[in-house]
Image (cartoon, rainbow, N blue to C red):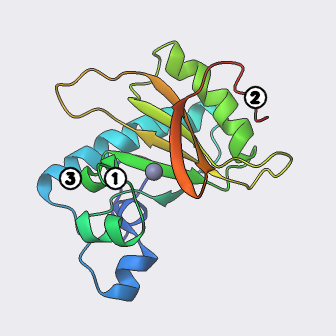
Amino acid sequence: MAQYLTEHFSLQEMIRSSYATRMGLDNQPTAKQRQNLVRVCETLEQVRDILGGKSIFVSSGLRKGKVNDGQGGAKRSMHKLGLAADLDNLPVGNYEAFLQIAPRVLSRDLPIDQIIGEFFIEDEPRGGWIHIGLARENSTPRHQILRAAKVGGRTRYSLWAEPWALA
Ligand SMILES: [Zn+2]
């Protein structure tokens, strides 16, 4: 039986990791991480509405310590706390979806701490993905918009200002 954290998002899709499965690593949430995932899913429900109410694919949610590090996640990634989700294969295209969500982050309609446009590719709707991170409980979200890109083989995060052009 699928266990739903909110109307459209299941626990399973928020903790699934092919890396953890392959390596036999634990990726079950603690009670606190589960609470965090519920908050993420509540935000994802809002994002889903913004994108027209079609189902959206979460490629990664919780990644506990070893899972995150093994998958090459950032050391201080909010995925470790269950406070982040990556979205991919979005019906309108990943970059296009980002363009629809980002203004709502700026206008503070969404309680998002950081939204990151990760490695978008021009004219390739399935290129890259969107990272959404929430602030810890009792912290105020910064409503930051960032871009991740490879510079000299290393991932660089930078603040991304409107109009969020790819070039
Ligand atoms: Zn992410």
Residue denoted by label 2: 165
Indicate the secondary structure of the residue bearing disc 3.
helix
Q: Are marks 2 and 1 in contact (CB under 8 Å)?
A: no
Instruction: Identify which residue is drawn at 13% across, 55% down.
Output: 31
Instruction: Tell me: is circle 2 under 8 Å from ligand 1.
Output: no
Q: Residue 54, how many percent across, how many down?
A: 65, 45
Residue denoted by label 3: 33
Q: Is residue 72 above or below residue 37?
A: below
Instruction: Identify which residue is drawn at 47% across, 17% down.
Output: 109
Q: Are marks 3 and 2 in contact (CB under 8 Å)?
A: no
Quadrant where the N terminus sits is bottom left
Closest to the observer: 166 or 91?
166
Instruction: Determine the CA span between mark 2 and mark 1.
Output: 27 Å
Q: Residues within 10 Å of mark 2 (few under 14, many from 20)?
A: few
Q: Residue 20, how many percent across, how many down?
A: 35, 78
Amino acid beneath label 2: Ala
Residue denoted by label 1: 79
Closest to the observer: 19 or 55?
19
Q: Is residue 142 above or below residue 151?
A: above
